[in-house]
Amino acid sequence: MITMGKYRHLSRAATTNGHFVITAIDHRSILLDSLNQYAPVPLDDTAFTDFKQLVLSALVPHSSAVLADPAYGIGRGITSGVISGRTGVLAPLEETSYEIHPSLSRINFIPGWSVKKIKLAGGDGVKLLLPYHPDAPNAAEKRSLVQQVVADCERYDIPFFLEPIPHALAPKGTLANAELLQVSVDNAQTFSAIGVDVLKLPFPVDAKQSQDEAEWLRACQAVDAASSVPWALLSAGVNYETFLRQSRIACQAGASGVIVGRAVWAEAVQLQGDALAAFLTGVAAERMRELGAVCAAAATPWQERVTPPGDDVAWYTRYQS
């Protein structure tokens, strides 16, 4: 049974119909590097914050929640009103590095940031990206880390959105689609059982290996059957057209929505001034509206995947006791 606090937070992070339509812009070093490839001068902290606020201001009106980092996204976003009190807020725990192959990576937490601080700052969800393969030498260590975050989220009564990313065991290897599906299903089973509240999952078929949408649907249905908690689809760097197709199929199979970043706003890193603003308020905003419509038409409300808290007149006497 889900707690009253977590139920309330998930409601704030979803649409009134129970679907996640979440803008993700928690990217840090990799996004800054991309911006600096096109910027006239390297971005300082203020300029990097300004970019994120432009993205958020354009997409928040079409989103049920945002996933943003504390330094450049959440702080200014809340105090400026760009992230209004009616918008759910998810925050990451980790610093993500793309320089090390996932099979060799360790989780580095954002210094000075924690589950407790996310809750106290008014957050509605805690996100952790976890490169994971069940047969990797560090799999047990990573499961233990997840269990620690589960315990922290239970203590502070805030939902845990886990993002387990399948990876090949060999540092230079890639996953064939058969293994990708196997690992995706295993991850959904394992981490549902451990106690995460929502799974933030990549598509279980590599579109470069297969464009067969019947195969895509079967794979998503297998992941859905393996997950005992709500799950949402992440974009994982694919282009918008591919992600739109994936979103339709994932929602048809049982996903409760999408948590999308670069598929919606990636082209913005190359733009400046009026061209940047026009892209965000035009193309990017329309993409979020379209994804919202996909979720409204086919996604499974997250409430259908949980047992609601008791709401009898004495519920509060048992709460967190």
Image: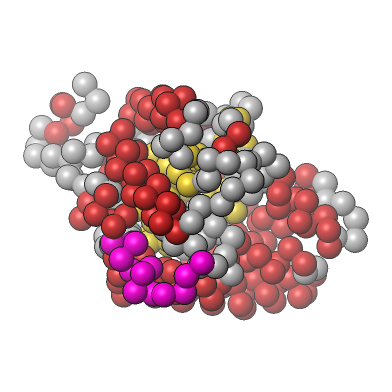
Judge whether 92 appears above or below 300 on screen.
above
* Residue 33 x %, y %: 78, 51
* Residue 168 x %, y %: 53, 45
| Viewer-nearest residue: 240 or 76 | 240
Q: Overall secondary structure of the magenta stretch?
A: helix
Please name the residue shown 56% across and 72% down the image. 240
Let me know if residue 213 is in the magenta part.
yes
Please name the residue shown 35% across and 53% down the image. 231
* Residue 174 x %, y %: 56, 52
| Viewer-nearest residue: 61 or 24 | 24
Please name the residue shown 59% across and 69% down the image. 239
Q: Is residue 313 visible?
A: yes
* Residue 251 x %, y %: 33, 66
Q: In which quadrant will I find the C terminus?
A: top left
Q: Is residue 83 visible?
A: no
The quarter of the picture where residue 257 lies is bottom left
| Viewer-nearest residue: 71 or 110 | 110
- Relative placement, left or right, of 268 versus 215 is right
| Viewer-nearest residue: 17 or 32 | 32
Let me know if residue 44 is in the magenta part.
no
Q: In which quadrant will I find the N terminus?
A: top left
Give the residues in magenta.
209-221
Q: Spot the residue most to the top.
A: 321
Q: Spot the residue most to the right.
A: 41
- Relative placement, left or right, of 77 versus 13 is right
